[in-house]
Image (spheres, helix red, strand yellow):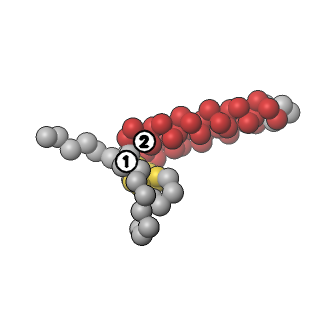
Amino acid sequence: MEERRLWFKRKIWGWYPCSWEGWLVLLILAGIFTFLVTRVEEDLLNSFIFIFIITVILIVICYMKGEKPRWSWSR
């Protein structure tokens, strides 16, 4: 059975990048976030919608390419 390569490692709350692919995803989404929010700073509702969409995309990528989340009291 082939072991998959992780892009993100699990923390107590969330994930952190552990490979160059994970860092690349994080940088790209941060760039998109910065670009979109500076373009719609006058419209607060659109800013919140863009932030929500980018956050959901990042969570989905972390879930697919990272360690599976589980409850952990220590670590």
Q: Is residue 53 above or below residue 15?
A: above
Mark drawn on residue 58: none
Q: From the image, tell me which residue sits under label 2.
A: 63
Total tally of numbered discs in the picture: 2
Tell me which residue sits at (44%, 67%) in the image.
73
In the rendered structure, the answer to whether residue 16 lies left or right of residue 56 reads: left
Tell me which residue sits at (59%, 39%) in the image.
55
Q: Amino acid at mark 1?
A: Lys
Q: Judging from the image, what secondary structure is the residue with disc 2 in?
A: helix
Q: Are marks 2 and 1 in contact (CB under 8 Å)?
A: yes
Point out the residue furthest to the right here: 42
Q: Position of residue 44 (x, y in %)?
A: 82, 35
Q: Position of residue 5 (x, y in %)?
A: 28, 45
Q: Is residue 55 above or below residue 73?
A: above
Tell me which residue sits at (33%, 47%) in the image.
6
Tell me which residue sits at (43%, 41%) in the image.
63
Q: From the image, tell me which residue sits under label 1.
A: 68
